[in-house]
Image: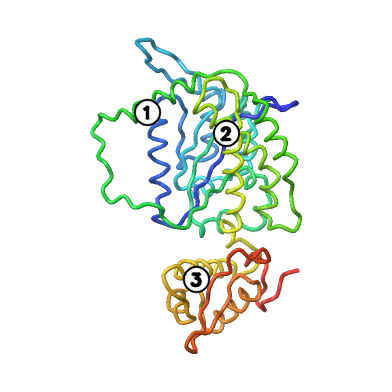
Amino acid sequence: MNRGDYNLFPNMFTILVGHTGLGKGRSINPAVGLLRESGCANILSDKLTIQYILEKISDRGQAVAQLTMQGNTVSIGHDSSCFISAPEIEDLLTASEAMPSLKELWEAKDGPFEYGTRGRGLVKIAKPCPTMLGGCTPSQIAVLFPSQAVGGGFVRRCNFVYEGDRSKFIVWPLPRNGNDPERDALIADLRHISQLRGSFAFDPIAKKEFEKYYTSVGGDEFADEATSSYETSKPYHALKLAMALTASRYDSMIINFVDMAKAIQMVDKCAAELRKVFRAVGDSPDAVIMDKVIRYIEAKSKTGYVTRSDIMGALWRDVGSSANLDVILASLEAGRLIKTSIQSNVTIYRLVKGNPNAVDPSLINNSGGMIQ
């Protein structure tokens, strides 16, 4: 889609965030399997270094796929596009200095992306266009994105999709016996979509919807760092997602109101969950422990009540001492993140929900006051 002095492409960086065993890989791997079987994408693994990925999509390493469609062989040049499958995104981001390169590649600029190596010299990538689907846990977020990196360009270019609970239990998944019309239809759709050419456009109602959204968002200097930086990119994420939704439904490449509204709703949901995603990131040395205490209270309150003894018994390795737990609980209560009540002479802890004055635990110091 033409945006004046540049073109915006529907490539996206999406990171699923959830606790271990919640099903991030079970969500990512089937989708990647469909894409791989379709043969219309240059799929790269998170086990590769960013240097290898750059080499692969450069003018020296481009691949060409061949598909057989209705008896005819069709060659698809991947240009400089790729799909990075990263169920364990920690492997990609820690194996090499990937973030600086990825945040620039996300923009898919018309001009060449250049990088140099000692052994290979100058390598050029013409019109790079990477897409990434990854997964990580909340505790990994604190390691991968320290507070000084949250305000950087990479975080605001990613859609962090957070889930705290498993929504469905499938004890006996249906067996795949090779005769799967639905899967075959999805693969055929992917191959068909890969042949679409041209620019996306708006229908009049969708155009007005985007104009309203574009003028309504803006960075809030008093919001937490992650939310503030993502806020400035929300219109572009919504446009990219609207293009993807349109391509999945129609060949016309005209974005309608339904897809534009759905894209805005999904991006706003990501933005609303960012405080949870980056709750353990901050300058306070106890930010990670505070996040664990909050998550414990949140989880256990759904099925019963939580006492100080419960928290200490479950998190003693992280808390360290009884005195330190008292400081953490006092800090969280002072920050209006948790509240207490007395039942039968026992103090019960609950999470404060829907409180607009709730603050991030990384902004609370060890004395229970706010970091200025």
Q: Nearer the viewer, mark 1 or mark 2?
A: 2
Q: Nearer the viewer, residue 163 or 370?
A: 163
Tell me if residue 116 comes above or below residue 353 in the rendering: above
Give the mark nearer the N terminus: 2 vs 3: 2
Residue, disc 3: 297
Q: Is residue 259 above or below residue 144?
A: above
Q: Position of residue 309 (x, y in %)?
A: 46, 82
Label for residue 52?
A: none
**Do tag 3 and tag 1 residues touch (Cβ < 8 Å)?**
no
Q: Which amino acid, by three-letter code, is at mark 2?
A: Val
Q: Residue 122 location in percent, x, y?
A: 63, 29
Q: Residues within 10 Å of mark 2 (few under 14, many from 20)?
A: some
Q: Quadrant of the N terminus?
A: top right
Q: CA distance from mark 2 to mark 3?
A: 38 Å
- Outermost front residue: 205
Label 2 secondary element: helix
Tell me the number on the disc at residue 258.
2
Quadrant of the image containing the C terminus:
bottom right
> Residue at image x 46%, y 35%?
44
User: Relative to 106, is 221 on the left or the right?
Assistant: right
Mark 3 Cα-neighbour bin, 10 Å: few <14, some 14–19, many ≥20: many
| Residue 355 locus on image (x, y percent) | 64, 65
Q: CA distance from mark 3 to mark 1?
A: 43 Å
Element assignment for label 3: helix
Q: Secondary structure at mark 1?
A: helix
Q: Residue at x 74, y 49 (%)?
A: 219
Q: Is residue 98 left or right of residue 30?
A: right
Q: Earlier in the sequence, mark 3 or mark 1?
A: 1
Q: Amino acid at mark 3?
A: Ile
* Rendered position, 323 above or below 27: below
Q: Are marks 2 and 3 in contact (CB under 8 Å)?
A: no
Number of residue marks: 3
